[in-house]
């Protein structure tokens, strides 16, 4: 995506009365919108090309938005915003836990949605420091390539991580052996209004631990600091990236 290419949006909602006017509005704002009424239709649209961001309803016939979100985040590495009538805090936590970047409750002001789309894309495209020279992080045998968003274990096997897990791990790697409280981590990982749902960070920590800890029930890398937050208890080294 560059300054002359419109932002491409995949809009998935089974209610045409909401989906079509919203697609028209986004189109007038300069977005290139592809519509889908079901998760199956959305998956077929993905075969035609990846969008820059996906807007998903949760409750749909057949495969629901949560399942589709998991696929988009883990397999396609796409930013996702939920647009749904389900506004309970537990629903938001589940959405954030599986890797959604934001959550908008119906009915909403489409201008606010546009602002959130742009905010999410800014966070998704934000590069870590020192990007003028490509580098990778190494810690306890693990390796994270921040440009390729690729995590490899001590045996060299690639470990799939979601966008949220990537941003969370990157926050720790940029601040090794520093205690990071929930508010700071949420600001780094989720951004605006995420502090309202601070249980989400605990769930994401649990998911990250299952990926990188030998025993996630007795974590040695991402440690809990009672009353303070979390800390990466590892030495982190940066080295030049190689192909």
Image (spheres, grey):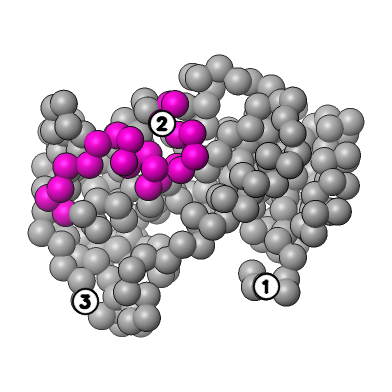
Q: Which residue is mark 3?
A: 239
Quadrant showing the N terminus: bottom right
Helix, strand or loop under label 1: loop
Q: Which residue is mark 2?
A: 195
Alpha-carbon span between mark 3 and mark 1: 32 Å
Image coordinates for residue 214, horizontal then vertical, percent: 16, 43
Q: Which residue is mark 1?
A: 3
Q: Residue at x 34, y 78 (%)?
A: 134
Classify 10 Å Cα crowding around label 3: few (below 14), some (14-19), many (20 and above). Answer: few
Is 2 placed above or below 202 here?
A: below
Alpha-carbon span between mark 2 and mark 3: 34 Å
Q: Read off the magenta span.
A: 176-197
Helix, strand or loop under label 2: helix
Mark 2 or 1, nearer chain start: 1
Is 210 placed above or below 74 here?
A: above
In the image: residue 100, left or right of residue 44:
left
């Amino acid at each position: 995506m560059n300054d002359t290419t419109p932002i491409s949006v995949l809009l998935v909602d089974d209610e045409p009365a909401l989906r079509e006017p919203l697609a028209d509005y986004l189109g007038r704002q300069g977005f290139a919108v592809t519509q889908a009424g079901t998760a199956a239709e959305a998956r077929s649209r993905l075969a035609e090309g990846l969008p820059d961001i996906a807007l998903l309803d949760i409750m749909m016939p057949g495969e629901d938005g949560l399942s589709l979100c998991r696929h988009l985040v883990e397999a396609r590495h796409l930013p996702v915003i939920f647009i749904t009538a389900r506004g309970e805090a537990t629903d938001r936590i589940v959405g954030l836990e599986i890797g959604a970047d934001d959550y908008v409750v119906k009915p909403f002001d489409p201008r606010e949605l546009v602002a959130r789309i742009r905010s999410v894309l800014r966070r998704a495209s934000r590069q870590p420091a020192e990007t003028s020279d490509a580098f990778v992080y190494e810690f306890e045998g693990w390796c994270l390539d921040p440009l390729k968003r690729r995590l490899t274990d001590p045996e060299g096997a690639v470990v799939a991580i979601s966008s949220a897990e990537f941003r969370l791990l990157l926050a720790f790697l940029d601040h090794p052996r520093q205690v990071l409280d929930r508010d700071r981590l949420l600001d780094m990982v989720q951004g605006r209004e995420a502090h309202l749902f601070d249980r989400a960070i605990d769930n994401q920590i649990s998911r990250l631990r299952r990926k990188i800890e030998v025993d996630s029930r007795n974590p040695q890398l991402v440690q809990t600091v009672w009353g303070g937050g979390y800390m990466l208890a590892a030495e982190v080294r940066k080295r030049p990236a190689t192909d």
